[in-house]
Image: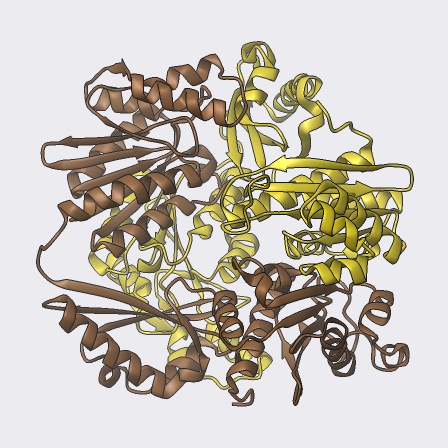
Chain colours: A yellow, B brown
C-alpha cells in the first residue's frame, strides 16, 4: 500500500509554521508497513489543492490531507473535497452533538461559524474530533482511500491514532515482504568518526540498509531490514544490532523515538537515585528536559538556574574568590556548582553546566561555544570541557544533550575519555 | 518568480526528523518577493529524485533542493544532478582547500570520504559551506535556476543567507505588484473569540487578506496586502493594523517571527527592571525561554525549579502549613512562591507557576491542566487560575506562554480580566 501526504496551508509554504504533521503521519504509516512515496505542501488555493488531489490519487493508494478545516473563512479544504468528489454538504446530527458537547465541556459559547462545521461531505464518513470542532473525513472510492483531517496537530494526531491507523492497518494486512526499520541513537561522536569506527559495513549489514542522520543531539543510525516474515526479519535485525553495538555501543543511548531524558529517567528510577541540577548557560533547559518526563518528581529534586554570580554564591556556595580568580566559566566553578547543588539538595548526584553561548560574552581565552559540564556523585566528581559552535540556541541544545549523556555515563559507569 | 522546494530524505518521509528546512527556505524566499508555489519531500531514491527535478522545473523558475549531500554512502543527490543535467564531476581545488581548512579548525583528521566531497558537478558554481564539508551547487540553465544544498540546517541556512538569497534578490527585482505579508501575534484568546471581537472583516481589510493560525502559543493573524508599489502597500498595511489593534490590541504581543521572550526582554531592559522565576510544573522551561535571548543576564537574575516541596520551603520560604492546608498546586502557594523568589533574589518582579501537567497527579478537585500563575511586583501581586489540556508537553508550553504574557501585562499595566 502506497501513501501520499498532502499538507495544505500558505503558512507552511512561507515558513511561518513548520510542517510537523507530515512527519507524524509518515511515522505512523511506516509503523504499519504503509509505504510513504511522497509528501507535498500546497497553498490555500482551490485550484492548487484540487490539482494536487489528482496528482496524489494517481500515484498512490492512500491520500492523507491535513489543514484547511478550521472555523474561519480562510479554510478551503472542505469546499475542494465537495468539488473534487462531486458531492454535497449534508448536516450531520452526530457531529453537531459532538461540537455542542465540546463547547459545553470548555465552558464556552458556541458561535455561528462553529455550527456550520456539522455539515460534512455526503460521500464521507466523518471522523470524530476529540480536541476540537472540525470533523475529519474518510472517503473510499474506486479502490482508493482519501482522508482529510484538520491541521491542528493535537486534533489530527488523535484522529490518526483512534480512527485512521486502525482502519488502514486492517486493510493493509499480509501483502508480501516484511520490513522493519530501527534507529539506534548515538551522541558525543561525529558522523564520520562513527562511520570509520564501524569499519566494513557490508559485513555488519549482510544485505540490510543503513542511513546516518546527524543533528545537534547526535547521529542517528537508521537500519532497514527486509525478509520473508516477521520472525526472520527480527532475527536478522537483532544480529545486525549486536554487531554494531560491539563496535560503538558506548555511544548508543537509545532506540527509535526515545529521548535521552527518558533513558535517564528510567536509569535513575530503577536504581532509586536522585539528581539536582545547577545551570548557568543553559538557563533551565536541562531541568526542563528532565521534567518533560512524567514521573520525574520521583528522582528530580530541584534545579537552580544561577544566572548571576550572586546566585551561584548564595544558592550553590560557590567560592567568590574562585569566581574572581578563574571566572564564572571555568572548570573550577563548574565543579563547585555540581558539588554545591548536590550538597544543598541532598541528592545522590549533582549535575552542573557553565559556558558561553554567544553571540556575546567572548574573551581572548574563552571563545563562544566553550562549555564546562560537571557531574558529581558520592565517590567521583568529573568536569569535562567542550567546544560547541556559535549559535546560541543550538549551543544550549548541544550542552543539554552532552550534560544528560554525562549523567547517563556516570550512572552506567561508562568512561568519558575515548 | 516562482519557486519550488524539494527536500530529499527517507528520514523525513517516515517522520524521523521534521522538515524545518523547507519552512526556513519558504520564509526567506517570501521575504524577497519570490512566490513559493509548492514544496515536496521525496525518498533517497534516484528515480524519484530525478522525476521530481523534472516536475519542479516544469512548474517554476527556481528549484531549491536540500538533503542528500553528506559524506556517507546513503547520499545520492550529487549523483542525480550529474545524471539529470548530463554533466560530469570535476575536482575543485578551492572546495578541497575549504574542506581541509574545516578539518584543521575543528582539530579533526580528514577522512578519505571527506576528500571525495571536493568533486563538484561541472555545470555548477559551488557554494561554500561555512559549517560543514559538503559544498552546495548553483546551476543556471535554460533561464531557470537550480540550487542544491546539504540537509543539515545550520549549513543550509548559512548558504541561503550568504549566497542564494542575495543572488535571487538581484535577479527578481522589479516585476509587477508589491506584496507584503505581516503577522500579528496574539495570545490568551481563542480563535473564534478573536474572530468575533474583530467584527466586520471586510471593513477592516479593505481588500487585503487575513488568515488565522492557532497553536499552543496563541493565534497568529497573517495579513497579506497587495498594491502598486512599496509605499502604497505599507500605508495600506499600517491602516489595517491600526483598525485591528483598536479592537484586540491588548492580546497582540508582537509581529512576524518575534518571540514573546524577546518582547519581554526588550520591555525589561528598556525599563531597567529585573526578574526571577520560581517554577514547579514547567520545570525550568520559563527560565530557559527567557535565557534563549542574548543579553538576558541584564534582567534575569535567577530561576528556581522547586520541584519538591522541600525546595519550595527552603529556597522560596513557602510556608509548610500553607502547603499542607491548600496543597502545592494552589493559589496560596503560587502567591508565596512569586513573593518568595522576588524577596530572595532581590529583583523587581517575581514570576511563579505551579500546576498539574499530567498524565498523572490528578485528584478530585484538581484536574490535569489546572495551573496557577503569579506575578508580584513592588505594589501588586496577582495570581490567576488556568485550565489547559491533558498533554504534558503542550501544557508546559501553554503555561510558559501564559506566564510570560502575565509578565508582559504586568510591565505594561494591561488588566488581566477581560
Between B283 and B41, the residue placed more toward the observer is B283
- Is residue A340 visible from the viewing direction of this image? yes
Q: Residue at x 49, y 50 (%)?
A: A359
Report which quarter residue B182 is drawn in: bottom left
| The image quarter in which residue B247 lies | bottom left
Q: Position of residue B248 (x, y in %)?
A: 40, 84
The picture places residue A20, in percent across and down from the top left corner, at 46, 51
Question: For this view, does B189 lie left or right of residue A123?
Answer: right
Q: Vertical placement of B167 versus A277: above or below?
A: above
Q: Position of residue B410 (x, y in %)?
A: 57, 82
Q: Quadrant of the C terminus of chain A?
A: top right
Residue drawn at 37 percent across, 58 percent down: A16
Image vertical order of residue A169 relative to residue A20, above or below: above
Q: Is residue B226 above or below residue A290?
A: below
Q: Position of residue B27 (x, y in %)?
A: 32, 53
Say if residue A115 shows up in the picture: no
Q: Classify residue A2 as left or right of residue A183.
A: left
Amino acid at each position: 500500500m502506497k501513501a501520499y501526504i498532502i499538507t495544505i496551508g500558505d503558512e507552511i509554504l512561507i515558513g511561518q509554521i513548520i510542517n510537523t504533521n507530515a512527519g507524524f503521519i509518515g511515522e505512523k504509516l511506516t509503523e504499519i508497513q504503509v509505504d510513504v512515496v511522497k509528501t507535498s505542501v500546497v497553498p490555500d488555493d482551490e485550484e492548487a489543492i484540487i490539482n494536487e488531489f489528482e496528482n496524489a490519487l494517481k500515484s498512490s493508494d492512500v491520500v492523507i490531507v491535513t489543514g484547511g478545516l478550521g472555523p474561519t473563512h480562510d479554510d478551503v479544504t472542505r469546499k475542494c473535497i465537495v468539488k473534487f468528489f462531486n458531492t454535497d454538504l449534508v448536516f450531520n446530527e452526530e457531529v453537531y452533538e459532538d461540537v455542542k458537547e465540546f463547547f459545553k465541556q470548555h465552558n464556552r459559547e458556541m458561535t455561528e461559524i462553529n455550527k456550520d462545521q456539522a455539515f460534512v461531505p455526503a460521500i464521507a464518513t466523518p471522523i470524530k474530533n476529540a480536541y476540537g470542532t472540525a470533523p475529519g473525513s474518510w472517503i473510499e472510492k474506486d479502490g482508493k482511500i482519501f482522508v482529510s483531517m484538520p491541521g491542528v496537530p493535537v486534533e489530527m494526531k488523535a484522529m490518526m491514532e483512534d480512527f485512521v491507523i486502525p482502519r488502514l492497518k486492517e486493510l493493509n494486512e499480509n501483502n508480501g515482504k516484511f520490513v522493519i526499520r530501527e534507529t539506534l541513537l548515538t551522541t558525543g561522536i561525529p558522523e564520520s568518526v562513527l562511520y570509520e569506527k564501524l569499519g566494513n559495513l557490508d559485513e555488519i549489514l549482510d544485505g540490510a540498509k543503513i542511513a546516518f542522520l546527524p543533528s545537534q543531539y547526535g547521529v542517528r543510525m537508521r537500519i532497514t531490514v527486509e525478509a520473508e516474515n516477521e520472525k526472520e526479519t527480527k532475527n536478522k535485525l537483532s544480529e545486525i544490532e549486536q554487531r554494531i553495538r560491539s563496535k560503538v555501543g558506548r555511544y548508543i543511548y537509545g532506540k527509535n523515538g526515545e529521548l535521552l531524558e527518558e533513558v535517564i529517567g528510567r536509569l535513575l528510577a530503577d536504581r532509586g537515585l536522585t539528581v539536582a541540577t545547577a545551570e548557568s548557560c543553559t538557563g533551565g533547559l536541562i531541568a526542563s528536559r528532565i521534567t518533560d518526563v512524567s514521573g520525574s518528581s520521583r528522582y528530580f529534586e530541584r534545579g537552580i538556574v544561577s544566572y548571576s554570580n550572586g546566585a551561584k554564591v548564595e544558592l550553590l556556595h560557590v567560592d567568590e574568590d574562585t569566581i574572581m580568580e578563574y571566572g564564572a566559566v571555568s572548570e573550577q566553578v563548574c565543579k563547585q556548582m555540581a558539588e554545591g547543588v548536590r550538597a544543598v539538595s541532598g541528592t545522590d548526584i549533582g549535575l552542573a553546566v557553565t559556558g558561553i553561548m554567544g553571540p556575546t560574552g567572548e574573551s581572548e581565552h574563552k571563545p563562544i561555544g566553550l562549555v564546562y559540564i560537571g557531574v558529581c556523585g558520592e565517590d567521583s566528581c568529573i568536569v569535562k570541557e567542550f567546544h560547541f559552535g556559535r549559535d546560541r540556541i543550538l549551543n544550549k541544545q548541544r550542552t543539554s544533550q552532552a550534560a544528560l549523556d554525562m549523567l547517563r555515563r556516570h550512572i552506567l559507569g561508562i568512561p568519558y575519555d575515548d
